[in-house]
Image: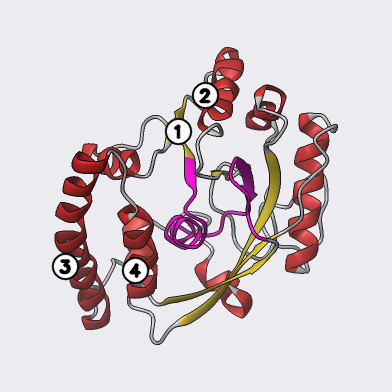
């Protein structure tokens, strides 16, 4: 039987901090964007939100250039706050996020929406990503398609990497590792744990957590999308010290 989520004092304080942060930053962002047509506040908001949630983020590796397509592992909902706060990236997301407020928040960070189940629209999806890469923001993909357990990588899907065929030649494809260190399994959101339970559990966690975001070297653009996908997966697995295979188990081996 799944235990009901429990709102601890620590989780309540962090939620209050997030609400207060939005109350301050939200209006500043809206006014800034209206006056100047752009705003740096989404990145600042996401970085501060990650810190309120307890993450202490360190960015390492080769600097990111404009027009970079980031291929990242996906462990937790915190990945969004951590990666965007560290790199100022936009994300590729399924088009049915749910609540309208979530859509509005995603829009503020220039999210690229795709229909994940729309196989015949793969070219349109890739073209939309390639167009987003014409801007200055890096664009990030989570090719696992969902959050994993943290202790191993799920299979990487290659469909959206078709964008490499439509992107300008100056676009770099960079694997990026989000590493929770020894707490990987604790932060992995995988299996049947309800979202609310996971959020309250992580927000109620004691202390802070050091998270490393590592930008690895650019991949060879001459590779096809399946080769690019495999190369990115192997590079990320190597950095995390994980075994990289064509398929990963649904549950860890004994």
Cα–Cα gap, marks 1 and 4: 23 Å
Seen in the image, is 252 located left or right of residue 52? Answer: right
Name the mark on residue 128: 2
| Residue displayed at 42% across by 59% down | 81
Residue 20: mark: 3
First of labels 4, 3 by sequence position: 3
Label 4: element kind: helix
Measure the alpha-carbon separation of dots 1 and 2: 7 Å
Give the magenta-colored segment's residue range.
63-91
Which residue in the structure is indicated by mark 1? 112
**Extreme residue in the front direction:** 36
The residue pinned by badge 4 equals 48
Which of the pair 16/132 is nearer the observer?
A: 132
Q: Residues within 10 Å of mark 4 (few under 14, many from 20)?
A: some
The image position of residue 53, as x and y in percent, is 36, 72
Q: Is residue 63 above or below residue 108?
A: below
Q: Secondary structure at mark 2?
A: helix
Mark earlier in primary sequence (1, 2) = 1
């Amino acid at each position: 039987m799944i235990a009901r989520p429990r709102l601890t004092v620590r989780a309540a304080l962090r939620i209050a901090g997030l609400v207060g942060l939005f109350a301050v930053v939200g209006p500043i962002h809206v006014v800034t964007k209206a006056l100047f047509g752009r705003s740096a506040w989404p990145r600042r908001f996401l970085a501060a939100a990650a810190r309120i949630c307890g993450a202490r983020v360190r960015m390492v590796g080769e600097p990111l250039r404009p027009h970079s397509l980031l291929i990242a592992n996906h462990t937790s909902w915190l990945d969004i706050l951590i990666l965007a706060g560290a790199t100022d990236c936009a994300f590729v997301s399924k088009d049915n996020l749910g609540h309208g407020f979530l859509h509005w928040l995603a829009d503020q960070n220039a999210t690229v929406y795709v229909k994940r189940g729309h196989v015949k629209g793969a070219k349109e999806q890739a073209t939309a990503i390639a167009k987003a890469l014409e801007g200055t923001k890096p664009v990030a993909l989570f090719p696992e398609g969902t959050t994993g357990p943290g202790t191993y990588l799920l299979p990487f899907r290659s469909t959206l990497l078709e964008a490499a065929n439509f992107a300008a030649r100056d676009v770099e494809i960079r694997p990026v590792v989000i590493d929770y260190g020894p707490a990987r399994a604790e932060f992995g959101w995988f299996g049947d744990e309800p979202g609310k339970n996971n959020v309250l559990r992580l927000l109620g966690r004691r202390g802070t957590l050091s998270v490393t975001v590592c930008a690895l070297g650019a991949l060879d653009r001459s590779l096809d999308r399946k080769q690019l996908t495999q190369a990115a997966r192997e590079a990320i697995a190597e950095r995390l010290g994980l075994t990289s295979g064509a398929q990963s188990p649904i549950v860890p081996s004994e």
